[in-house]
Image (cartoon, grey):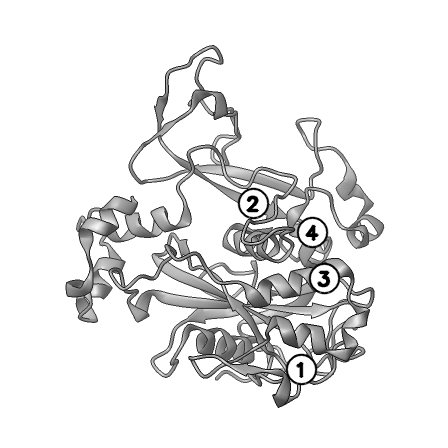
């Protein structure tokens, strides 16, 4: 572990050092998962005497997250095991704010890092050989980066979400926890993290900036370049390198692309009733933090996608259905996360762009366990 340096932080923006809203979680209030981990259950939330500080919306969010189980068809599957060398995890650490709302801890990556330097991110990293589970990976990385202790009685598990695929051919799994001990002091690992701050979880379902940002950064409520919406949230559509899909022409919309900033040419005649074959796109979202003037970048890409999904699970009015943001999460015909993962394993393996996932399966002796017919069917 790299040397760490203590950084004094504003208590108004962080849970550490402020009032302990939920209190310590006693051993009698937790249950043991088959993995041997402590997980906060929905019954624990009901019994906790300090939950009166939570809003009803926050209570529902925590109950939904504590009860959440990924869909049965979500990866990994016995017929497509994930190679450990291509697995990573991030920790979605939630805490309760002064008014009973839920916040998530976000960090600024050091500018000297080789990848994603200076980006706003969640604590996390690749799986190490000593990690027994993906939760171990997320907790270890959070301890190394921001000093959040892996004590499951103070920071119990809420749920483990479905894995996400990133272009570096990594399979990233979000692990959602709740900070119960708000007296913990962060210790930032300066070579990796240079700042730590919080953001309202519910704001990842809205294109309108939260009240705290409106007060501190009033310019964020100005209209965007197209005359509609707020600049707090924007999105860009990117071409997917997988197989084409058939799309209902009535559902194809204009979308700006990051590379050209022009209207997409893959739009059918509005009077057409014939399905069209289109190269799929996937959408990347961006949310301003209100701290951009201080050098903090917006929440973007993978981190934004994870936070949107966490908020959709938590704030759902009728699980297992997901909550609907006031913006479109994905464009019509966009490949699902499972489809993108399956294609990442199936895609060609040319010498100039080797398939690292396929190579890892071979190196770890897992290739013989893959049912390639089922994998291709998902794509």
Q: Which residue is mark 1?
A: 6
Q: Earlier in the sequence, mark 2 or mark 3?
A: 3
Closer to us: mark 4 or mark 2? Answer: 4
Residue 241 falls left or right of residue 329: left
Q: Secondary structure at mark 3?
A: helix
For the residues carrying marks 1 and 4, which lies nearer the camera in this image?
Answer: 4
Residue 311 drawn above or below residue 138: above
Residue 61 can be seen in this image: yes
Neighbours of disc 3 within 10 Å: few (<14), some (14-19), many (20+):
many
Q: Earlier in the sequence, mark 4 or mark 3?
A: 3
Classify 10 Å Cα crowding around label 4: few (below 14), some (14-19), many (20 and above). Answer: many
Q: If you read the primary sequence from the N terminus, does the residue marked by circle 1 or circle 2 appear first?
A: 1
Marks 4/3: CA–CA distance: 13 Å
Which structural element holds mark 2? strand
Which residue, given by chain and number where applicable, does mark 2 sit on? 285
Q: Residue at x 56, y 49 (%)?
A: 322
Q: Earlier in the sequence, mark 3 or mark 1?
A: 1
Query: Compared with residue 122, is residue 143 higher up or lower down, i.e. above or below?
Result: below
Q: Locate residue 240, reporting x and y percent.
A: 37, 39
Tell me which corner region of the image, top left, top right, bottom left or bottom right, holds residue 314: bottom right
Q: Residue at x 79, y 65 (%)?
A: 100
Report if residue 190 is visible in the image.
no
Residue under label 4, please give it.
203
Q: Which residue is labeled 3 in the image?
A: 58
Q: What percent of the width, then of the height, locates residue 243?
A: 29, 36
Q: CA distance from mark 1 to mark 4?
A: 29 Å
Front disc: 4 or 3: 3
């Amino acid at each position: 572990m790299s040397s760490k340096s203590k950084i004094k932080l504003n208590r108004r923006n962080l849970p550490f050092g402020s009032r302990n809203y939920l209190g310590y979680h006693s051993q009698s209030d937790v249950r043991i998962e088959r993995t041997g981990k402590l997980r906060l259950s929905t019954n624990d939330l009901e019994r906790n005497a300090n939950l009166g500080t939570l809003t009803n919306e926050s209570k529902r969010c925590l109950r939904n997250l504590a009860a959440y189980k990924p869909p049965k068809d979500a990866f990994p599957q016995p017929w497509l095991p994930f190679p450990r060398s291509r697995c990573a995890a991030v920790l979605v650490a939630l805490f309760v704010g002064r008014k009973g709302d839920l916040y998530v801890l976000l960090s600024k990556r050091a500018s000297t890092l080789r990848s994603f330097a200076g980006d706003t991110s969640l604590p996390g990293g690749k799986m190490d050989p000593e990690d027994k589970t993906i939760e171990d990976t997320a907790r270890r990385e959070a301890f190394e980066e921001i000093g959040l202790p892996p004590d499951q009685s103070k920071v119990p598990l809420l749920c483990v979400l479905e894995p996400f695929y990133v272009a570096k051919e990594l399979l990233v799994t979000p692990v959602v926890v709740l900070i119960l001990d708000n007296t913990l002091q962060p210790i930032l690992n300066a070579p990796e993290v240079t700042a730590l701050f919080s953001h309202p979880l519910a704001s990842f379902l809205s294109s309108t900036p939260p009240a705290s940002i409106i007060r501190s950064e009033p310019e964020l409520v100005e209209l965007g370049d197209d005359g509609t919406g707020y600049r707090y949230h924007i999105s860009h559509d990117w071409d997917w390198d997988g197989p084409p899909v058939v799309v209902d022409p009535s559902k194809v919309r204009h979308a700006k692309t990051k590379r050209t900033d022009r209207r997409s040419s893959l739009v059918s005649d509005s009077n057409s009733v014939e399905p069209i074959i289109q190269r799929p796109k996937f959408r990347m979202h961006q949310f301003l933090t209100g701290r951009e003037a201080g050098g903090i970048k917006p929440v973007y890409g993978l981190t934004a996608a994870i936070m949107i999904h966490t908020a959709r699970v938590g704030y759902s009015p009728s699980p297992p259905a997901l909550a609907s943001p006031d913006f479109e999460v994905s464009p019509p015909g966009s490949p699902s996360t499972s489809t993108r993962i399956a294609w990442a394993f199936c895609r060609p393996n040319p010498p100039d762009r080797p398939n690292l996932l396929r190579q890892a399966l071979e190196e770890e002796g897992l290739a013989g366990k893959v049912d390639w017919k089922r994998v291709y069917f998902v794509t």
